Image: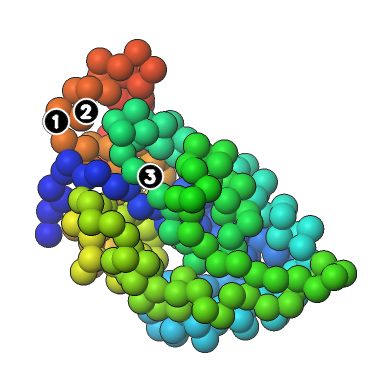
Amino acid sequence: MALRPPFQRFVFDCDSTLSSVEGVEELATTDELRASIEALTCEAMTGKVPLDEIYGRRLELMAPRQRDVNRIGQRYIETAVPGAREVISALHALDKEVRIVSGGLRLPVVTFGLWLGIRNERIDAVQISFDKHGRYQDFDRQSPLARNGGKQELVAAMPPMRTVLIGDGITDAETREVVDGFVCFGGVIYRKEVAALADAVVDSADLRALLPATLSEDELAFLARHPKHSALLNQIPRS
Ligand SMILES: [Mg+2]
């Protein structure tokens, strides 16, 4: 139950981990609808209800239009967790493979991921389709990311590499069997069910707090000497 850096691959969840919002909830047009969607998400992320039961239900309730879905990408950027972009840039400087594996909608997650500096082919999320008027039609029912255990399958199928996964939800915690470390990021929403399954818990609202837990002494020393990234280490919040 302790993290053992170094890791070669960092896999991030998106919603409530890299961004402080749940993208799908941003589609709700009324407070009432938003409350129902939030309740469904909460039940799925704490493991009370299987994700595939609520996945389609949330989208059907909101019937989003394509232009609204496109706007979530911008919302993700506006609500990026403090330090997210800097941390990812530092991980790239350390030659890490950085990925996003998200149960969110692919288009906005890619918009956000590219802004964070993550390559398109390293971003996995759920495709949805629209009719010719831009009205919601369906989601990719084959996607493992729309059901429980799906993140675990997807991560297990990646080429072997020492991997740490960082997330806030139960679908993130499910990967702990197939990764070398699972970090519960509680900086946006702290879920005790998820923290109980984690090798480490980061509950600062600033993602920079992730670095001391997931990097080796040598890697931290490398960043300390790096002209672009050394300042980052002084900005790490103390817990
Ligand atoms: Mg999440």
Question: Which residue position is annotated with label 1?
Answer: 217
59 displayed left or right of 205:
right
Q: Residues within 10 Å of mark 3 (few under 14, many from 20)?
A: many
Pinpoint residue 194: horizontal percent, then vertical percent: 31, 67
In this view, the residue farthest toward the right is: 133
- The label shown at residue 98 is 3
Residue at 45% x, 78% y: name it: 147
Instruction: Report which residue position mark 2 lands on.
Output: 220
Marks 1/3: CA–CA distance: 20 Å
Numbered disc 1: secondary structure: helix
Which element type, helix, strand or loop, lies under badge 2?
helix
| Label whose residue precedes the other's in the sequence (3 or 2) | 3
Which amino acid does the dot numbered 3 rest on? Val
> Disc 1 residue type?
Glu
Towards the viewer: 35 or 69? 69
Residue at (40% x, 78% y) in the render: 148
Task: Tell me where residue 60 appears, x and y as whole percent.
Answer: 69, 80
Mark sitting earlier along the chain (1/3): 3
User: In this rendering, would 45 be left or right of 70?
Assistant: left
Q: Indicate which label's residue lies in the foreground, 1 or 3.
A: 3
Residue pictured at 38% horizontal, 44% vertical: 98
Percent coordinates x, y for residue 58 in the rendering: 63, 77
Report crowding for label 2: few under 14, some 14 to 19, many 20 or more residues within 10 A (C-alpha): some
The reply to whether dot 1 and dot 2 touch (C-beta < 8 Å) is: yes
Q: Kindly tell me whether residue 237 is visible in this rendering.
A: no
Quadrant (top left/top right/bottom left/bottom right) for the N terminus:
bottom left
* Mark 3 to mark 2 CA distance (whole Å): 17 Å
